[in-house]
């Protein structure tokens, strides 16, 4: 069986037997993205227009969509297994993508994250770290890179946040295992990329503290506190203050999980 695979954790593309499929120009790819992230759900022409063109919908309106759907359907029909491959259905109120036997890198990422959660629940922290590292391998760049429209931008931001949360959790587990040295390089990079992300700052403080670099851990706190005051006009949260007090007392514990996990 030859299965089609779709990739969105980087430039959107499809492959079959290792060969790239041509999903067309970027507008056509953006149309496909609205279907791919709504698998088995009907997407109306109005939703596609708004998601791909935003406030700049041409006067021709919904007449733009059928040619894109036709070309996408032709590409998928030629690549998939008859009756079991991906297919775009045209319904009375819109379009629906069925994946059939096709797979996606987003599903691979979700599966690895779910297996990591199961391993952690069973007390296998090292296994959870390995699975979260496996999940990160699904990523090859900015998700849906280069695709226009508010829908692609919204999905891009959502996916990037999920990636950061996954990386944060892997680092948190490494710190719980006492692997501060292993976590430091990624935490340092995350701190530079997300200077106002509190959980990253606390974990970097913890990693530095675990590895005997207490003065540098204090410097991270001071810099983060100054950034909060200068850019947001707020004081450190109780979690950050607790980490600081823990350092002063020589008993800095593990960083608390961010709200919502």
Image (cartoon, rainbow, N blue to C red):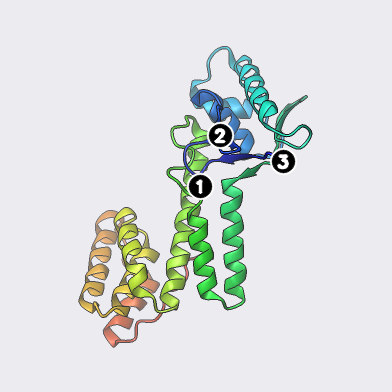
Q: Circle 3 is placed at which residue position?
A: 1
Left or right, 220 with reference to 34: left
Q: How many marks?
A: 3
Q: Circle 2 is placed at which residue position?
A: 19
Q: Residues within 10 Å of mark 1 (few under 14, many from 20)?
A: few
Q: Earlier in the sequence, mark 2 or mark 3?
A: 3
- Asked if residue 53 shows in the view, the reply is no
Q: Circle 1 is placed at which residue position?
A: 158
Q: Residues within 10 Å of mark 2 (few under 14, many from 20)?
A: few
Foreground disc of the pair 1, 2: 2
- What is the distance, in whole Å, between disc 2 and disc 3 at their CAs? 15 Å
Helix, strand or loop status at disc 1: helix
Pinpoint residue 261: horizontal percent, then vertical percent.
54, 65
Left or right, 189 with reference to 150: left
Left or right, 242 with reference to 116: left
Q: Which of marks 1 and 2 is nearer the N terminus?
A: 2
Q: Which residue lies furthest to the top in this view?
A: 60
Helix, strand or loop status at disc 3: loop
């Amino acid at each position: 069986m030859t299965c089609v695979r779709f990739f969105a954790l980087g430039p959107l593309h499809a492959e079959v037997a290792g060969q790239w499929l041509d999903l067309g120009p970027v507008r056509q790819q953006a149309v496909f993205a609205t279907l791919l992230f709504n698998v088995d759900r009907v997407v109306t022409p109005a939703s596609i227009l708004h998601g791909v063109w935003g406030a700049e919908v041409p006067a021709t309106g919904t007449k733009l969509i059928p040619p894109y759907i036709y070309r996408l359907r032709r590409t998928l029909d030629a690549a998939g297994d008859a009756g079991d491959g991906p297919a775009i259905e045209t319904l009375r109120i819109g379009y629906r993508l069925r994946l059939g036997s096709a797979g996606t890198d987003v599903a691979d990422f979700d599966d690895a994250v779910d297996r990591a959660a199961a391993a952690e629940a069973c007390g296998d922290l090292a296994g959870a770290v390995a699975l979260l590292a496996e999940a990160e391998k699904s990523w090859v760049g900015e998700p849906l890179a280069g695709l226009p429209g508010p829908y692609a931008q919204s999905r891009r931001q959502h996916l990037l946040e999920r990636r950061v949360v996954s990386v944060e959790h892997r680092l948190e587990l490494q710190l719980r295992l006492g692997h501060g040295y292993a976590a430091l390089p990624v935490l340092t990079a995350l701190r530079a990329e997300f200077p106002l992300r509190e959980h990253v700052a606390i974990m970097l403080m913890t990693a530095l503290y675990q590895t005997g670099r207490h003065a540098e851990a204090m410097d991270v706190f001071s810099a983060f506190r100054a950034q909060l005051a200068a850019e947001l006009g707020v004081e450190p949260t109780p979690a950050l203050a607790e980490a600081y007090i823990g350092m002063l007392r020589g008993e800095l514990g593990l960083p608390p999980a961010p709200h919502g996990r």
